[in-house]
Image: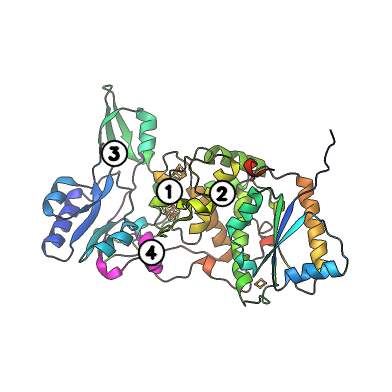
Amino acid sequence: MQVKEYKPLIVAFCCNWCSYAGADLAGNNRLNYPADVKIIRVPCSCRVNPMFVLRAFQRGADGVILCGCHPGDCHYTSGNYYTRRRMALLFSMLDYLGIERERTRVEWVSAAEGAKFAATMNDFAEKVAALGENKRLEDLRCKK
Amino acid sequence: MQKITRDVLVEKAVSLLENGSVSCVLGWKKGEFDYDITPAVFESKEELVSDFIFDDFCGANFSKYLVQKTRKVEGKILVFLKPCDTYSFNQLLTEHRFDREKVYAVGIPCEGMVDIGKIKAITGDGISSIVCGDTIKVNTIYDESFDINAKDVLLERCINCKSKKHVAYDELIGEEGEVIESNRFDEVARLEAMTPDERFAFWQNELSKCIRCNACRDVCPACTCEKCVFNNPKSGVENKAPANEFEEKMFHIIRAFHVAGRCTDCGECSRVCPQNIPLHLLNRKFIKDIDSFYGEYQAGAEVGSRAPLVNYTTEDIEPCDVFERGND
Ligand code: SF4
Ligand code: SF4
Ligand code: FES
């Protein structure tokens, strides 16, 4: 039997106006970031409700990262200010329940920050990989 | 143990009913046993005189009943509110959930309510009668009798009572109380000080007991959506008893998050949970975090205040800094 090399599955919610474009730029510039980062485009970071994050973990994500425009730059003026409060509380709660805090992150990435996007993903993937598989919030029935 | 008696409340209710100021009364009524007091609607003097109860088992908070009741009833509803209930009352008003004009609220003082679970832990099952008082007298069908100090078997929320002050009323029976210092966050802090593995073990032990009866949702005065995701078969989260680790936690995270910033810490959820899951520790975690990140906020303290999660400042703490801020 061949042992599969463990690679963390990472779900990145990226807002359409900044971070998704940032990811695009990273690609255009041929910057490397792990292929296991699955990007989900959302209209604004505040579109992400807590259930999205939990759902990602349920379906087997090992880490969830949320990227949006820098505070003050949200395309909808204030969406990311709400996101900031929501995610601060949600992630603190996950930590309280014993789900490792390194598995969740919020990062502000603008459309011009392709390099930051790649660096963020590399760093996040590395931290999550060190923790190993997410067992505390996954639904085994969703396993393929 | 309560300082005011049932008779005072019945007298008040009867006089308001008879002079036509109110058309019905929300109050407590004896259930099958002495201790399972249920909320009830009284419409006549006779019903009040024969069935109305007020004793140390009257934990039930009536605020939420007003949402449905005010729509159905002609005229005003008389409701009795303990101090903690008035916070829920205000929170519902803030969210425009009922018409204030249709309610006549009478604030009543409270000396703390008792927890039947704690009494049963002492006496065992088979309670045949209970007489309330500073010393609670319990008889069982096995001819045993117990004298229990009421202060030893208080509900968790009463041990950590946050306020004896009524924040809303039309009329007050007894004296105006004060907001009091409580130790309600101690237990949260104790959990925060544990390692993630210990916390995980603690919550897994607690949350795996959940039978998804949804009682905590049903009773919560902050949970008043007409349609709930947990009733919707298409949502994929409607499942009954949680089958695995995800479902155990998901329900509780979503329930607590849904009321974060609006939960008044009325303690009803923990009181009604048949599995004795300490739901208040989830709610209070959010309250504690909100207090420390965004400044102290008590939901329901005043009508019209803006809940922290529908508000922001440009200077808010970054999620990545949350753990550095002495939150460990
Ligand atoms: S979550 Fe519990 S303590 Fe908070 S308002 Fe609802 S029932 Fe009361
Ligand atoms: S009341 Fe208790 S058992 Fe019922 S759903 Fe809520 S936590 Fe679970
Ligand atoms: S549009 Fe990017 S965070 Fe709102």
| Amino acid type, callout 3 | Tyr
Looking at this view, name the residue that lies furthest to the right. Answer: A30
Instruction: Give the CA separation, mark 3 to mark 1.
Output: 19 Å
Label 1 chain ID: B
Task: Describe the element under mark 2 as helix, strand or loop.
Answer: helix
Confirm or deny contact between disc 2 and disc 4 (CB under 8 A).
no
Tag 2 and tag 4 share a subunit: yes
Among numbered discs 1 and 4, the one appearing first in the sequence: 4
Instruction: Give the CA separation, mark 2 to mark 4.
Output: 26 Å
Question: Which residue is denoted by mark 1 in the rendering?
Answer: B216
Can residue B2 be seen here?
Answer: no
The answer to if B101 sits in the magenta stretch is yes
Q: Which residues are magenta?
A: B86-115
Among numbered discs 4 and 3, the one appearing first in the sequence: 3
Among numbered discs 2 and 3, the one appearing first in the sequence: 3
**Front label number (2 vs 3):** 2
Q: Which mark is residue B250?
A: 2
Ligand 2 is within 8 Å of the C-beta of the residue at disc 1: yes
What residue is drawn where x is 33% and y is 39%? B150
Label 3 chain ID: B
Residues B265 and B76: in front is B76
Tag 2 and tag 3 share a subunit: yes
Confirm or deny contact between disc 4 and disc 3 (CB under 8 A).
no
Instruction: Give the CA separation, mark 4 to mark 3.
Output: 28 Å
Label 2 chain ID: B
Task: Describe the element under mark 1 as helix, strand or loop.
Answer: helix
Question: Which residue is denoted by mark 3 in the rendering?
Answer: B35
Question: Which residue is denoted by mark 4 in the rendering?
Answer: B92
